Amino acid sequence: MSEGWLELGLRACVMVTVPVIAGAAWGVLRGLRRARPEAPDPVGCVACGEAEVAWIADGVYVCGCGYEGGPGHADWLRAERRRRLAGLPQEQRSALAIAALREARTLAGDADVVLRRLQRSLRAEVSDGSGRESRPWEVDLLSATGTLAQAFAQLELAADGLGGTAPAAPDLRAELWSDQLGQYDLVCVREDLIRARDGVQALQVAADRLAAAADRLAATPEPMAPGGR
């Protein structure tokens, strides 16, 4: 298998993966249209504010401005990605999964390095309530959690290619400042650190499981098409 083909395949999957992460896609899967579903409660386009939108699937709409969204958008995109990947030959699906797993492990390793540094910083942290200025560990935590989210997205891509499952990314807080305390809530920071470290471990275990599945898929003979020889 050529590296050029693999790169094209990865790019094709990333076109669907990125909107799943962001929760909003611009013109993705435009050629796939189903019977017009019943629209849920009236909702306008979050991109331009237009009230009239076309519902293309349960909880999914497309607006004339080109925006696709809705409460069911991320799940719909993932289902379509699974369908597209399922139509690829086994060898291609295995190669795509292995490449995604390699990227997931690299990203998780990068996040773990930052999380370990963060852990050392927190041991020396003394909360003085002197203001909301950014602290070094805050930058590390935001960097690590962002990288970890990318790692889980790659893990999910590998699982979709193999028809398997992947653990969800850890649920981390977006706001660490406590108005009640008037300072950073270090208890919350430490809890997020624990969740993130646990997430790295969960990803590594899942990556090993999916890698074994990818190897089995690559070694399994492709089913012969009806009438084939």
Image (cartoon, rainbow, N blue to C red):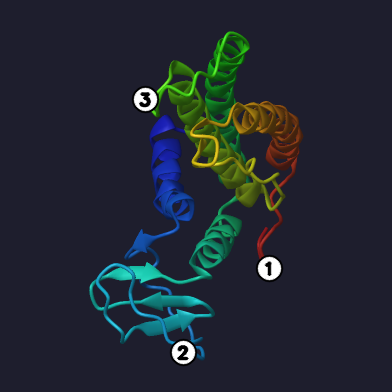
Foreground mark, 2 or 1, reads 2
The mark tally for this picture is 3
Instruction: Report the quarter where the C terminus lies.
Output: bottom right
What's the amino acid at mark 1?
Pro
Question: At x 56% / y 13%, what residue is drawn?
Answer: 125
Helix, strand or loop under label 2: loop
Within-10-Å neighbours for mark 3: few <14, some 14–19, many 20+: few
CA–CA distance in space, label 2 to label 1: 34 Å
Check residue 36 in the rendering and tell me which mark sits there, or answer none: 2
Ranked by sequence position, the earlier of labels 1 and 3 is 3
Q: Nearer the viewer, residue 151 or 141?
A: 141
In the rendered image, is residue 3 in sight? yes
- The answer to whether 77 is drawn above or below residue 191 in the figure is below
User: Do residues under tags 2 and 3 come within 8 Å of each other at their CB atoms?
Assistant: no
Residue 175's spot in the image, x, y percent? 49, 41
Provide the residue designation for mark 3.
Answer: 133
Q: The residue tagged with tag 3: helix, strand or loop?
A: loop
Name the residue that disc number 1 marks: 226
Q: Nearer the viewer, residue 103 or 19?
A: 19
Q: Residue at 37%, 25% (x, y): give it.
A: 133
Q: Position of residue 72 (x, y in %)?
A: 53, 70
Q: Quadrant of residue 190?
A: top right
Examine the rendered structure and indicate whether residue 223 appears above or below residue 136: below
The image's mark for residue 72 is: none
Which amino acid lies under the numbered mark 2 shown in the image of this protein?
Answer: Arg
2 or 1: tag closer to the N-terminus: 2
Is residue 93 at least partly visible in the picture?
A: no
Crowd band around label 2 with a 10 angstrom C-alpha radius: few (<14), some (14–19), many (20+): few
